[in-house]
Image (cartoon, rainbow, N blue to C red):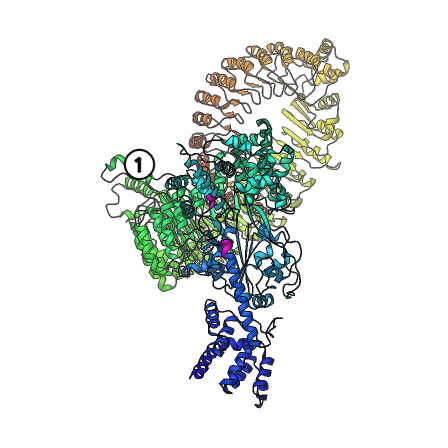
Amino acid sequence: MQLQMEDMDLQRAIANAQPQLVESLSHVPEWLLMKAKCFLPHMDLSHVDGITGCKEKVLWLLDTLENAGPIIWKQFIQCVCMECSLPMDLEIELMSASGEGNLNQKQEAIAEASTQSPSPPTGLGRRRHGSNSHPNGKMSKQQRLDSAGRYRHLIIASVSQRYGNGRPAGAAVLGQAQPPAFSQAFVNLVIRQSKASRLKERADKPREDLAGMQEAEECVDTAVKVSDLFESVVSSGTTRVILLFGKPGMGKTMLMHRLCQKWAEGALPQFLFTFLFEFRQLNLISRKLTLKELLFDLVLQPEDSPDAVFQHLLENAQHMLFIFDGLDEFVGNIDQPSSPYVSPVLHRPMSISELFANFCFGRLLPGCTVLVTSRPKKLPNFLLSRADLLAEIWGFDHEKVEEYASHYFHQHSFKEQAIAHLKNNSKLLSMCLIPALCCIVCVCLEYLLRKRLSKVELPQTMTQFYIKMLLIFISKQQTEGTVNEDTQLNHHRTAILGLCDLALKGLEEKKIVFYVNDIPEHVKEFASLHGLLTVFEVKRSDSFPEAGHAFVHLSLQEFFAALNLMINNAVDGNYLKKKFSLKSKWTLKNEARTEFMENFHIFLSGLSSKECRTFLTQLAERNQVWVRDKQAAILQSLKKMAATNLTGPKIIELCHCTYETQDLELAQHVGSQLNFKYEFRNFRLTPLDVSALVFIINCGRDLTHLDFAGCPMELDCLEVLASCKNIERLRLTGGSITALGLTGLAQVFPNCLQLEEINLQDNRLRDQDMGKVIEMLSRVEKLKMIDLSHNDISVKSVLTLAKGATTCPNVTELHIRKDTIMIYFSGQPRRVLRSSNLRRSEHKKENAAQIRNLKLRLQDCSLNSQHAGEIAALLRGSAHFSEVDLSGNQLSDEGCRELAESLPEAHISKQLDVSNNQISVDGVCCLLNAVNTCLNVVEFEASLHHQTAILKFIGDREFASTHSRNISRSGDQSGGGESQKSVLSRKIRLTDSRFPTRDLDKLCTMLKKCSSVSELDLSNNALGDQGVGKLVGLLPELKAVNSLKLSGNQISLSAVFGLAQCLSALDHIKSIDISLGNTQSVHLTFWESVRNSSTRSAGKFPAHPQHLENDHCFRLRECTVSPEDMDTLCQILGKCTGLIELELSRNALSDQSIERLLISLPLLHSLKLLSIRNNKFSPNCTLLLANSLNLCERIREVEVRSSENAFLHLAGRIESQETSCRLTDCSIGQNEVEELCRILEQCGRLAELDLSGNQLGNEGLRCLLDRLLQVHVSRLLNLSHNKISQDGVLHLINTLSTYRNVTEVQVSLCSKAISLIKFTREDEPRKILRLTECNFQPEHLPKLFSLLQKCTNLTEYISTNNNMTTRAVEDLLQAVRKSLGTLRISIEEQWVRNESIASLLQMAVHPHGNVTEITISKDKGLLRVGMGFPHRMEKMESVVSRLNQCGLEAKHIHFLQKCTQLQELSWSHVDLNNAEEAMLAGVLLTLPTLRKFELTSSSVTPSRMGHLVAALQQCHAIEELNLGSLGLDDTAILMLVPGLHKMPLLKRLLLNNNNIGSEGCSHLAEALKSAPHMEEINLSHNKIEHAGLEKIAMLLPEMQNLKRVNLSSNSIGPAGGERLAEALARCRHFEELLLARNHVGDRTAARLSLSLPSMCHLKILHLQSNNIGSLGGTPLAKGLVECQQLEEISLSENSFGEGAIRTLSEGLPRFTRLRKMELKLCGISDGVSKHLALGFSRCPVIEEIILSWNSLGDEGALELATVLPRMARLRVLDLDNNRIAARGAKKLAEELATCCRIQVIRLWSNPVPKNIEESLTKQDARLHFSFF
């Protein structure tokens, strides 16, 4: 029975383990086949060769062995266990089931194996027997198990003795052998698992799925227990590496000791063996070791069978834990093994670094678990990549600090007091989060509380705590109260100095373990007595154990090393700076890091504080000056470090150093240097780090931006941040903030009074957290923005946030788009609303101010129709919205319907956007219905193609204001029939939707209800002719419409005719604009008057004034119109009584179509303008257009340009008016002249004929001139640019003598090619001939002179650069003569500049008549001679007498005889020599009739000036004296004054461009008192200041005949300006006042505004560039309005402001004579352009408007273009250097086509594209885009 039971056990065991057994044996199929043949020698096993799969072979062989019987089967299983390397759990189970071993061994093995996690199979091989193995295999196996068990118990006992509860009292944190005060129970540390890349997959999941994800799947920096570190790593048969890192003092070493202790107690059953290696001891191993030596020599030798034990360890590696503590303390370099896939030889000696690396990479004991601890700053990259799990020790949290303190003070009566002291001091609590510092704080606190002081004052910094701890340790060994601290310090000074030397030497030599010989005896006794050094057993390979000493914590060694530098007499400031610089830590990465100096620089900084100065002075036995100098070196180094580029960790270290100094001045300097550099990336910050950071920020003066990205932080850090006063922006992104962190933020942030922005992107906030965000964080007083983007939210969160935003009073905007979440706040503190029972009337304004308009943007948030109800409820609520954007969702038609129904109850002031929501026509209709039902909807825009749907609103206040205005306007006219919904005008744009027929009917039904719509756009809907007809039929119902757009609807010419009929059917239609090109355009505009119930044949319309009914316009572009279609169109248009403009553009009209149109013109009774643009005309068609003058008597102007554009202007009534015909650039040649003349002969009222730019040539010109009498041109004939030569010029000259009504001929053969003939209807005695650059050759001159001789009535001949030589001029002067009258001859040639004055004068007396004028201008090369006929020769005796009187030579007799009648003598730019000067002075004395004398821009010396003045005194008839640009100063004026007294008839005195100052001006004023006839004074461009101007101002009112005063460009300031303005109030007779380019300012302008109304005759006023601003501009504009006689105003280069420009614009209609207005560089923008344009349009005679160098854009250009046709006399519009782009330029060109009188519109330096410029210039050459 027993045997049967064992067989059943074996069968069950094999059945359970079969998969694992098959897997293990499949690696050795040959061995299995060999054993099967041994156990079954008589069985044929050849069948196995036919099985291909390895596992199938194993299964077949196992089944065969099992079927052979239980005895063979059991023996086979025992053989497998003895010879194969099986997994330990499998081996134990098979051995137990097969009966191998005794019962007790089985139970123990099963107990151990039962705690193991199943391991995957390892590789199998031949089992290697130990040297001491028994010959019997079963006994060998048992022996190994026994030896391994005994070794395991030996290890457990050793660990328990060293780290267990029974060990000698030791510190929980600071070391092993410590004073009794440090004997504490272990307190668990906070450990967090770091982020893993495997969690990134959550970013790809849709929002709806995120809510269902498990927290464990996505946690980052997750809190874990120590046991979790091993359970979270799944065993895979490979070495598992766990990397545990933590900052100094976090308790890493103590945690490892605790871990070993717990293992010994059985808490980690998965590990059979645990080995702890400390790198600080491994540093002592210099020789190479084998693995066996590492385990047995350095840890513990087995009692017996070491080979067997070692073999057991090798076979059970997956159940072994190796701890390597303190990697950062290792002095060697650890590199990645060169061949990670090659297994090393187990017996090969290796260095410690090689052993460690091979452990980590699984080359030693593959499958084991390796736990490594280190500080974070020394982590090899290969180790980070190799680690299976990363975790960080965070030290204590608040609960664990309290737990630790409870254990520490558990025997003290002041336990609760101590704990409360810790909890109430935030800085102290931050320190205690580091376990090592927590212990030190408790030591100090215990010491102070024991003294029972009234006030417990703890140190402020870590350094001060260490100093305090040292003093306390010393004091505890003394009798209470017997010796003070200073005495104790002096007593132990030598030992302390020795300890400092030991610490520094150790750091410099990278040594932290010291032997007995390393430490002086007195130092060792002192340190051991006071618990500063710990003693432990040290092994160096196989040597005997030795005693090793180390500082209880590495930071303590750093403290004493830093103290050494500060008190060492051999260390000066320079050496200190060198040691403190820590270049590798602060700047350079490529230098070797100083080992074991994590806190060294912090202690140096702390020792530099003022509080440590006394302590250092006592230890160093030096004075405070010496200590202060050393401290100053450290402080200076810190200042320099603050100015460098630092990374985030380095900034934190700098903050720690600065905090340790407790130097506020240094902190302020560092804060100013670091401001806007606070960027921290991907490293953890402790509360102590944040405390140091806050200290620096609070010491700074500026607001700060903090940026933490990917930086794990505890809630304690956030509490510390709350004390930061100067944070303006805070970013906490890429972290792990959850609901708990959010609660912490909400509690601390209200204390940050300057905080405006919070960024919480990329955290772990979830749906359940979103409801808290707004309510909690909105309490921050100045908060303006929260960024919650890239958190784990769903649609539920979106709606939660939306609800929160509507209820929170200081939220101004919620913007959510996909993963982007932005919340904006008002940045103002929340107000407590008054209770409802208070009197509302008293607080109406206050409550109105509290109403905020929320922007709600929920874009691409996966909202569907199911969510529409919740959104509609939000809209119906009490919240007021400015914008609601729901675009990019899936609301569909049903959702839009719910939203539309909620709108009447909603408060939206701007717009609702539901674009891209999968809506159809039904959804559009639902939204369209809101236009009718919702009172404040002003615009609806929708497109099914683009999926846009936007409703725009007007705010409640604006709605109420508009409603009240409209009600007051309408009065009782509505009769109660109109509802409030018709108060507002609305716009509807339904474009790009392609409505089917059935949907169009539905749409029309909805549109009928929208009676208040003002603008309707139904473009691009493929409506066709039928659809357009339906919509046009709606117009009688749409009573308020003023714009209808039907573009892009694929209509034909039939629809055009239908639309044209609207002109006669609809009274209030303004214009119809149709284009049937590639992009069809249809636009109907209406007058803005609201129609009522009055009816006509086509609908119900009100009666309107007559002028509105006649204002209709029809424009048709890009449409092929046949002659028959033209007839139809004209018949339709003929029925329209109000058609004033007809435009046909780009229609490719044939000659026949145009002829039909012209024939129909008499039927268009109201037409004022017919324009045919961009239509190529044939020469015949051009003549047809010219003939229209004879077809329709109302035509006043026919203009055809470039054979492409034609404009016919018609008068309203048939009356006798002149007509004009302009056929420019129409290729009219000689062949067409005859027919053209025949047509023009029939027109008896032709005033102007313009044939410029054609191809007449000389012959065509002659033919035309021959029939000039029959053509009857009465004003102007323009033949410019007709390719004529000198012969043609002669033809033109001949008209002067041939035709009596020709008054002037002007010809130029230069590039301008001007050929003009001017006519007069009256007998005009004046005939003028102007010839420019005609390049006459010798053969032409006789003909020219002959023609001039025939023209006996010639009054003026002007020749400019016509190649006239001196000889030709002399011949000319001899040839011209007339019987009676005057003749002026002007010759302008280059040679005049080089001729002498005498030669020119001699030439001037050649004419036959008396010389009355001689003008010589050398700069222009001009010689002008005026003559009078008949010639009267003075008697020779009289001439000789005057010659003798003047002392002139006889050679001047002829000159004097010819110049007795000389009245004008003008010389310019001449340089007189002495002889010429004498002759000039003498000649003047002989000219009794001289009235005008000019000598300008010439050089005159003072002596010559005296001669000249003396001569002028004899010219008593002079009326005009011009001495400009002669450089006259005050002295010269003083010489001139006597001469002025002798000129009683002087009317004009011009002294401009001189150097006259105030003194000269005073003398001049005295002289002018005796000039009663003075009419003009020009003193511009001088240096007249206040004193001189005072004299002039006093004189002006007395000069009753003075009309023109020019004081421009002087030095007139505000004071002089005001004085002058006062005087002008009495100058009623002034006509011109020029004060440009002075500095009179606003006060003068304001004073002048009071004087202007009295200057009733003022015609010209120049005030440009006078520093006049808005203060003076507005009153000046009001004063100008009173001067209604003004013809020219220049206010350029003054910054008046918009108010003054508006005032001026309003007054412009009162300037009935204004011809020119200059407003250049006045800062005029589009804002005032409408007012200005309207004002100009009401100036009836305005000719020139200068608006260059302003800020006018397209809107301004559009306004000006609109009024151009109203300014009938406008010639020049200057818009240079503005901001007009293509749109504005095109509109100007369009309107310019209708304005034939405008000569030029200047648009230079405007942002018009070059191609547009060229196109517009070609269209109309009057548009100038160039500077010249």
* Nearer the observer, 524 or 365: 524
- The residue shown at (58%, 81%) is 32
**Placement of 1297 over or under 1226, stated as above or below:** above
* Nearer the observer, 1752 or 200: 200
**Placement of 670 over or under 765, stated as above or below:** above
Query: Quick check: can you spot residue 1109?
Result: no
Q: Identify residue for label 1.
A: 846
**Placement of 1271 over or under 1034, stated as above or below:** above
Q: Position of residue 156 (x, y in %)?
A: 50, 60
- The residue shown at (39%, 63%) is 996
Number of numbered markers: 1
Image: magenta residue range: 160-188
* Nearer the observer, 1 or 1748: 1
Q: Main secondary structure of the magenta part?
A: loop
Query: Quick check: can you spot residue 1240?
Result: yes
Q: Is residue 1355 left or right of residue 1790?
A: right
Report helix, strand or loop for mark 1: helix
Task: Say few, some or many: other residues with alpha carbon within 10 Å of mark 1 (under 14 / 14 to 19 / 20 or more).
Answer: few
Q: Quadrant of the C terminus?
A: top right
Answer whether residue 1377 is magenta in the image.
no
Q: Is residue 63 left or right of residue 502?
A: left
Quarter of the figure with residue 848:
top left
The amino acid on which the numbered mark 1 sits, given as a three-letter code, is Glu
Quarter of the figure with residue 1351:
top right
**Placement of 355 over or under 174, stated as above or below:** below
Q: Quadrant of the N terminus?
A: bottom left
Q: Position of residue 1599 (x, y in %)?
A: 51, 14
Answer whether residue 187 is magenta in the image.
yes
Q: Position of residue 268 (x, y in %)?
A: 47, 61
